[in-house]
Image (spheres, helix red, strand yellow):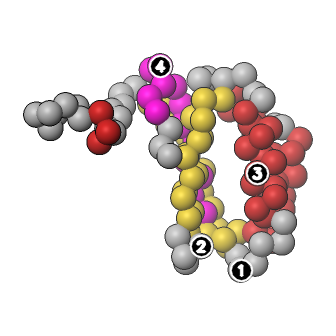
Amino acid sequence: MISKVFELPYYAVIFTSKRSPGDSGYSEMAQNLLIEAEKIEGFLGADSVRDTEGIGITVSYWRTLEAIDKWKNHTLHIEGKKMGIKQWYEEYSIRICKVEYEKFFESSVLKPDGIG
């Protein structure tokens, strides 16, 4: 499911990565990180995909830059970053963007004329 529309403006943190082979606790950490992120005031949601080659993109949505900083400095997130560098990722990038416009389409809400 794709995250729905949020009140504008907000921020998106785009994490693009290439995984190393094997899990080595990655799945459990990813699940725990999402649980912790949801506890931070200003966390709006996240979308994540990964292909069969190990390339993944996770976009997390935040109300403020301050909320992103809280996440950046969260103890479990710091531990996850260290493990990522040590064993989970071959490479990654992080980008932070301010979202000032968005549009969401869902086919189940199309009107009879085909226009949502």
> Which residue corresponds to mark 2?
54
Residue 115: image quadrant is top left
Horizontal relation, residue 102 to residue 1: left or right? left
Does label 2 or label 1 sit earlier along the sequence?
A: 1
Q: Amino acid at mark 4?
A: Glu
Q: Amino acid at mark 1?
A: Pro
Does label 2 or label 3 sit earlier along the sequence?
A: 3
In space, the residues marked 4 and 2 are separated at their CA atoms by 32 Å
Q: Which mark is residue 98?
A: none
> Which residue corresponds to mark 3?
31
Q: Secondary structure at mark 4?
A: loop
Q: Secondary structure at mark 2?
A: loop
Q: Residues within 10 Å of mark 4 (few under 14, many from 20)?
A: few
Q: Which mark is residue 7?
A: 4
Residue 80 location, x and y as percent? 82, 54
Does label 3 or label 1 sit earlier along the sequence?
A: 1
Q: Residue at x 76, y 62 (%)?
A: 27
Q: Is residue 38 visible?
A: yes
